[in-house]
Image (spheres, grey):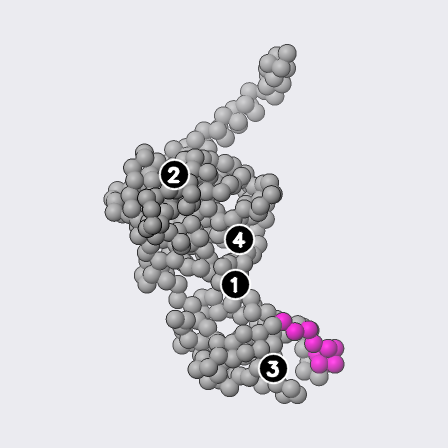
Amino acid sequence: MFNGYLKCELKSTGGKDLNLLDEYSRAIKSIVDAIGPAVVTINIGDNSEPLNFQHNGTGSGVVIAPDGYILTNNHVVADGKNIEIVLIDGEKFNAEIIGNDLSTDLAIVKINASKLNYAVFGDSKNLNAGQFVLAMGNPFGFQSTVSTGVISSLGRSLRSIDGRLIENIIQHTAPLNPGNSGGPLLDSHGSIIGINTAIIAFSQGIGFSIPSKTAEWVVSQLMTSGKVKRVYLGLSGQTRIVSNKFLRFHNLKNNQLFEIVQVEKESPAKKSNLHAGDFIAEINGVSVKSVDDIHHILAEWPAGKEINLKVIRRQEMFEVKITPEEMN
């Protein structure tokens, strides 16, 4: 009865719709055939015992250069004393960490191999909600698992291990499971538009990926220096809601300001004579209300390039020039 009903339904849709389904299937297959060999399993062990990957952890990665460079999540490899890469054909390699970045949860590892299949970065700047995506990885150790979905939202933010926000996160519906972390999110051309980084526990159909634009910038930094060069001011603080009287007195539009709570010794902030209790209203003309706003402005700011702060100290508003320095 079921088979007969199904045949009637398929016949009634007409050959055109069936052809579209066939084309869709062929498109997915072509992406999997092309990119599948570039997606690897990452097994993690320690030095105290022979590798026991089911116990110590597994994740995914994607080859981004034919001479053995592999991009993954930092949290996949950060605690690994031994890192083993397994290619799609089962060949295994030991890997070393070339560089990692806590702030974006990305890392590059390298294996001693050449002429590998690899994937290329696509453009994550022009994505749209509803756009088709395909996720590849190795959840629960099941190699070469493929799932499809659509972009459900753009511009999300996730908090990284070091407290910074990872911005412009891609939220999508391609099912992810433990072990998918570090695998690629692909567009219909098979280009990397994101690196899958997180799932929300006990939820269904919600996955997050670091956009390829961010990943490309981090990769360039890690490949040249082994770390991402970021600058700092040397201050910490909190968001403070100020009174309407305070707003009128200083002719402000935003009632949320960043209040400095602590200034580090020998820091750029100390050298510029900033004090605890000062308010930062603007940086380079952009309103500031939280430490995340400061991190956003400084994200790709070069060391040694001066910035302008609008500071409020008690009854006085004034400008401060400060030169960010590279973090150690």
- The amino acid at mark 1 is Gly
Residue that label 2 marks: 35
Mark 3 neighbour density, 10 Å: few (under 14) some (14–19) many (20 or more): some
- Measure how far apart labels 3 and 2 are at the Cα level: 54 Å
> For the residue labelled by badge 2, is the local secondary structure a helix, a strand or a loop?
helix
Instruction: Residue 254: say if magenta.
Output: no
176 left or right, relative to 112: right
Task: Say which label, 4 or 3, has the lower sequence index.
Answer: 4
- The amino acid at mark 3 is Gly
The image position of residue 120, as x and y in percent, is: 38, 46
Q: Can residue 141 be seen in this snapshot?
A: yes
- Measure how far apart labels 1 and 3 are at the Cα level: 22 Å
As drawn, the label of residue 29 is: none
Q: Nearer the viewer, mark 3 or mark 2?
A: 3
> For the residue labelled by badge 3, is the local secondary structure a helix, a strand or a loop?
loop
Tell me the magenta residue range.
239-248
- Measure how far apart labels 4 and 1 are at the Cα level: 16 Å
- Measure how far apart labels 4 and 3 are at the Cα level: 33 Å
272 left or right, relative to 39: right
As drawn, the label of residue 277 is: 3
The image position of residue 211, as x and y in percent, is: 48, 52
Instruction: Residue 246: say if magenta.
Output: yes
The extreme bottom residue here reads 315
Q: Which of marks 4 and 3 is in front?
A: 3
Mark 2 neighbour density, 10 Å: few (under 14) some (14–19) many (20 or more): many
**Image marks 2 and 4: residues in contact by CB distance under 8 Å:** no
Residue that label 4 marks: 169
Task: Say which label, 2 or 1, has the lower sequence index.
Answer: 2
Q: Which residue is drawn at 45% across and 29% down?
A: 26
Residue that label 1 marks: 163
Q: Can residue 188 be seen in this snapshot?
A: no
